[in-house]
Amino acid sequence: MMPAIIVDPLRKTSTVNHTRRTRITKDQYILDVSWEGAHPTVSEIRVEADWDTTYPEDSPVVAEFMQRSGYNKVEMGTVGNIEMVESGKLADFQTDKPLHYRVLVFDPHSGILLGSSARNEVRRPKEESETINILAFKAARLDKTRVTRIQFPVQVDYPIVVYINDSCNELVEALHNETKNPAIYALTVTPYLQTIAWRMVSNIRLNSDLDLDPRQTWEGRWNTWISSAKGLGMKGLEDIDYDDEDKAHQWVDSIVLAWSRKQGNPVSDVCSLLGGI
Amino acid sequence: MVDLRNIRELTDKGEAEYQKVWDEVPNKDPPLWMLYEEEYSTPVVFDDGLPRKIDVDATIKTGMDLALLVDGALGVSVEEARSHPQMWSWLSLLFYKQLRKGEMGDWPTSKSGQSGASMEKFVFDEAYGAFKYYRHRVYSRYWLWKTYGEDARVYLVTSANKWSEISEQTLGVMEIISCPGLIGAVNLLYLDESSKTGFKLGAGGDGPGSPRRFRDVFWQFVETYHMQGMDKEQIVNLLPSEFDKYRGIA
């Protein structure tokens, strides 16, 4: 049975506290959010204060997270047995929007809050504006029947290179032109994007310990671009079951689709290039 | 007559064109001519590599009609549906004449844009309507139905071209729209499908026990209870006596 509380006067800004709940201040806990990958992740929640004398030991401790209409909670056990959380994925949350959280301690029987932090906002930290080239086009002497060839890097600080037959000077110039003709990009980048994504899947299947840190491998750099808000904003390799053939197919397709959408209407661009209307 | 066609999404050019409707007061006619123009919209390809079809001649009376129509046509997860923001703009344009009061050549609009027809209700533009996404005529109905099912009926019984006081007062609060118990409590309190409006008498006002008061009381409750851990009956029973009329006690 819920105890009755007095709820008047009622205003949005009311600070009425008839239940003697205490304020949980930021110095009592550590909460970190990681913004890497398709969804933000709680990378750490740790209680620094001794709550044993403040709340009954069977009181549940919860960190609740909200983003727009989405809600996730991370259960941390009870005051008498607090579990420190090392990782908690905030499913359905997006990395390009801020999230809000509260840390709560409540009575397990009545649901009354015994302690509550303020509603805090966490934003994705601004990324350093370092631009890294992950795909390059270079003219090269290729067999006269061959238009392009892809080469994967052996060193992390090298990009993937698409070599273009230097006999086809028009294509080299079109790809290097600042106007970035969308039709040319659609015809060259899109199929190679599929190849690159499949190579990433293949490499991580061969080596499940593949380092996806963008400072360590080209796969990490591409994975960061695929999953970051400034890139394609799609799931990263770590977010899919890459051993499942269907899931891997879907992932590769979703990357090609997201890229194509970013280009506008590549079908129309290519048709126009070839003389269509 | 059923006319099934591929569901599409507006291109950037299409979205910009759609937004021009709100450049003038009274608003211009919607650019229905661009619904199937390749430059302005493209068919949506879903994660399974397939398009989806929708009856473009469907008659929509209530928010529920709209939610069921769209859900039946899409048949995908909310997350996937949400990942196509400009599909929602295209759908609102497709059914524009059924989702807004007025007719071609005459779309009543107040100067303040508060007539129930402001842009965020039709164009799913996150940059423009960052905190108003829940008002989108099509997406909000679909999302509520998919997320809360029968407990969202109170938000869906309204005419498709209306936005109820209940929706306005309760859906704009993050802690309410994300809480199954609170959404269910609103449904228990105010839904009356036997009435003409679909609501209990007085639910559209601002008197004692009204949705506006529910929101006021909520702000006290959220500081006092772990609301996400409570079910709808617990929340309704917790409300003060001014809600007795809607609880069916008085």
Image (cartoon, rainbow, N blue to C red):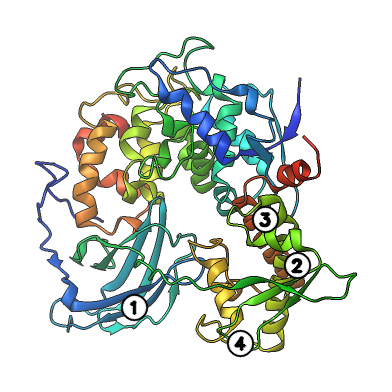
Q: Chain of mark 2?
A: A
Amino acid residing under circle 2: Asp
Q: CA distance from mark 4 to mark 3?
A: 25 Å
**Vertical order, B229 against A245 (above or below):** above
Q: CA distance from mark 2 to mark 4?
A: 21 Å
Residue corresponding to mark 1? A77
Q: Which residue is at 68% across, 60% downward? A: A173
Residue corresponding to mark 3? A257
Residue corresponding to mark 2? A246
Q: Are marks 2 and 4 in contact (CB under 8 Å)?
A: no
* In this picture, residue A259 sits left or right of residue A22: right
Observer-side mark, 1 or 3, equals 3
Sooner in the amino-acid sequence: mark 2 or mark 4: 4
Q: Which residue is at 38% across, 27% downward? A: B164
Q: Chain of mark 1?
A: A
Amino acid residing under circle 3: Leu
Nearer to the camera, B15 or B100: B15
Q: CA distance from mark 3 to mark 2?
A: 16 Å
Q: Considering the numbered disc 3 on the image, is that residue within a helix, a strand or a loop?
A: helix
Same subunit under labels 2 and 1?
A: yes
Percent from the top left, x then y, of residue A159? 61, 78
Residue corresponding to mark 4? A210
Percent from the top left, x then y, of residue A110? 25, 61
**Vertical order, B4 against A54 (above or below):** above
